[in-house]
Image (cartoon, rainbow, N blue to C red):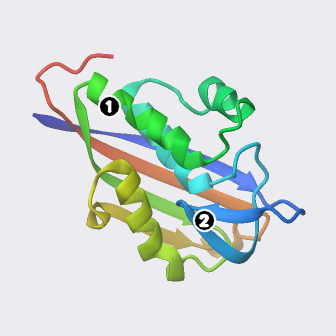
Amino acid sequence: MYTISAVGQDSHRFTEGTKPLILGGIRFDGSRGLEANSDGDVVLHAVTNAVSGLTGVNILGRIADEMCVSGITDSAEYLKRALQELPLKNMRLVHISISIECAEPKISPYINSMKEKIGGLCGILPLHVGITATTGERLTAFGMGEGIAVTAIATAQCLHEQYMF
């Protein structure tokens, strides 16, 4: 048995409307939402992209677009769809590391809730979900308050000797 890791990234601009902000499956009351056809959960989008990197099956794009058109806008559903590919590739998710860059909102009060939610969605313990946040010292548009960028790394155990796509 061995482990592999994959990186996922996503970013969204804040919306001017009244859309709620959802990050890591948690609603951030009093914060501006993010522009997207879905709920705009940039954290779950980055995790979905990382899982897609493990399996080689891209979910965000055509598959998520089709789900969105059919009325499925909850980003947790996109992640669940990506996770369905892991056992087909003889993999088991063991850890997720997430880095969030934004000037607002304050992320730290929500970290434990996000870890619980993401761990539950992914079938791993919250202690195997790492979340950090930074303003990036205002060096990017995200650090200057224009939106949120997230990078995620997903690590999985390959359950067989042969890793096949």
Say above or below: 47 vs 54.
below
Q: Where is residue 55 drawn, in percent x and y?
A: 38, 27
Which residue in the protein does label 1 denote?
Answer: 86
Residue 87 is left or right of residue 162, and the answer is right
Label of residue 32 in the image: none
- 28 vs 150, nearest the viewer: 28
Q: Amino acid at mark 2?
A: Glu
Q: Where is residue 68 drawn, in percent x and y?
A: 70, 35
Which residue in the protein does label 2 denote?
Answer: 101
Q: Amino acid at mark 1?
A: Leu
Say above or below: 74 vs 52.
below
Residue 136 is left or right of residue 98, and the answer is right
Say above or below: 136 vs 58.
below
For discs 1 and 2, the disc positioned in front in the rendered view: 1
- 151 vs 116, nearest the viewer: 116
Residue 115 is left or right of residue 8, and the answer is left
Dot 1 crowding, Cα within 10 Å, few <14, some 14–19, many 20+: many
Residue located at (72% from left, 52% from top): 12
Q: Where is residue 60 drawn, in percent x and y?
A: 60, 33
- Between marks 1 and 2, how big is the CA–CA gap? 28 Å
Instruction: Give the quadrant of the N terminus.
Output: top left
Q: Earlier in the sequence, mark 1 or mark 2?
A: 1
Q: Where is residue 22 drawn, in percent x and y?
A: 64, 62
Residue located at (53% from left, 48% from top): 76
The residue at the far front in this view is 71
